[in-house]
Amino acid sequence: EDEDDDDEEEEEAESGGDESGGEELAFERKARKTVARMEAEAAEQASEQRGAAASFTMPTGPREEMPDIGTLKSRIADVVDVLGDFASKRQEGVTRVEYVSLLAEDLQQVYGYNGELVELLLQLFSPAEALEFIEASEKPRPVTIRTNTLKTRRRELAQALISRNVSLDPISKWSSEGLQIYESAVPIGATPEYLAGHYMIQSASSFLPVLALDPQPGQRVLDMASAPGGKTSHIAARMGNSGTLVANDFNKQRLPSLASNLARQGVRCAILLHADGREFPRLMGGFDRVLLDAPCTGLGVISKDPAVKAEKGFTDVQRCQQLQKELLLAAIDSCTANSAGGGIVVYSTCSIAVEENEAVVDYALASRNVKLVDTGLPFGVEGLTRYRSKRFHASLKHARRFYPHTHNMDGFFVAKLRKFSNDLPPGAQQQPPPSKAASKKKPPPPSKKRQK
C-alpha cells in the first residue's frame, strides 16, 4: 500500500499539481487500481472455484447427516459448474439426471423451495440461470414510486422529496414517471406528497402493462382486476382523466382501498364495479382497451411473499391457468374490434410459469380473432415459442418476460393482443357463463405482497 501511495504522489507531481483537476485525477487513478485489484481477486476466486469443480465428486452411499448450509451452497455451485460444461467436467459413470437430482435436493434444503417448484424452475431455466433467479428472489427489489401526473410532474416531485432528505433517481429511460428510492429519512408512505396523491408506491414491473396498453384520452377502458388501484390510476393519468374507465374487482373487500387510492390521486373518470370478470361480456362491452392483470400464483414475486416457495406447486399453476383462460376470453369478448386501430387487450401476470403465460395466450389466439402485436416496451426477454415438448404460435415472440435476476424487478409477463373481428373464428364457441357455484368461489389469490 505504501508503494501505491508513493506511486500516486509521483503521478500527482508529474501532473504539475493542477488544482483544477489534480484531486479528480488522483481519485480516478485510485479507483482504477481498486477496480483492477477487485478484478484480480474475482479471477482468482473463479479459478479456485473451477479447480474445486474439477475435483468435485458426487457423494456416494446413504446421506445420514445433512451438511451445513455453507457446504451445501458450495456443492450447489460445483454442480452448476459441472452441468454448465457437462461433457468435460462430468464424473465418469455419473449421469446428468443424477447431478440435476442432487442440485434440486440441495436447492430445496438451502432456499426452502418445495420439490415441484424447483422442478418447474429447472425446466424453465438452465441450472445456472435457475440459481441466479433463486438468489435474486432472496433479495428485496428496489423501492419505486410512480409520479401521479394528474397532480404534479416528476421533476417537481423529486425536488420535493429531496428536500425531505429522500435519496432517489429516475428509474430508467423507459419510464417518464418512475423514481427509485434509495434512502428516506421519513416513511415513504407517509409524506405530505404521498397523502396528497402526488405519487403511488408501485413496483417498477407494474408500470409495464399500462405502458403496453397505451390508453388514450376519451377512450372507453376496462381494468378487469383493478384493486388496489396502482395500474388503474396510472391508466387514468394516461387518459388525462377524460373518457370512461371501468375499474372492476371480484373481491368486494378490496373495493374500499381501491376507492381510497383513486380519490387520493384525483381520479375522476373511473366507475368502480364489483363483478366476476368472466361475466363482463354479458354485463357490458364495447371497450376500446382492456387490461387483464390476471390472478396468478405469484411465482415472480417470491421476494415479497416467501411463502410461495413452500406453498405453490403444479396444482396451483393448473388451477390458475383455467381461470386465466376464462378471464382472457371474457376480456377479448368485452373489447370491440370497431375501435380505431382495433380493440386492444393487454394480458399480464406476476408469474414466470409458461402454463400461466404463453399457454394461456396461445389458447386465446386459437379461440378468438385476435393477433399478438409488439408491446412497445423497449426491453425484456421475448416470449417463448417452444417449451419442452410444447410449440406455441410464432407471434408469441412479441410478448415480453421480465426477471428479477436479469432486470432487477419482479418477475412479470406482458402480452398485447389486437382484436381484428368481433366474429368468432370457425369452430370456436362463445364462453358459457360461470356456474353459480363457481362464481361464488373466489379466484385463487395472487401473491399476498403483490403490488398493482
Image (cartoon, helix red, strand yellow):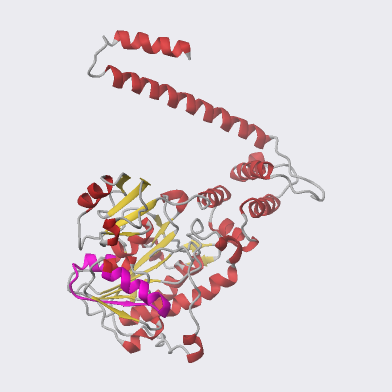
Residue 4 in picture, x, y percent from top left: 44, 14
Q: Is residue 251 visible?
A: no
In the image, residue 247 above or below residue 299: below
> Quarter-wise, where is residue 220 in the image?
bottom left
Q: How far from the left and from the top, in percent, is residue 257?
A: 36, 71
Quadrant in the picture for residue 228: bottom left
Which residues are the magenta region?
234-263
Is residue 219 a member of the stretch shown in magenta?
no
Q: Would residue 248 be counted in the magenta stretch?
A: yes
Residue 322 horizontal side relative to residue 90, left or right: left
Q: Residue at x 66, y 34 (%)?
A: 52
Nearer to us in this view, 78 or 186:
186
372 with respect to 306 (left or right): left
Q: Is residue 396 visible?
A: yes
Instruction: State the residue at coordinates (46%, 86%).
Output: 439
Quarter of the view holding residue 295? bottom left
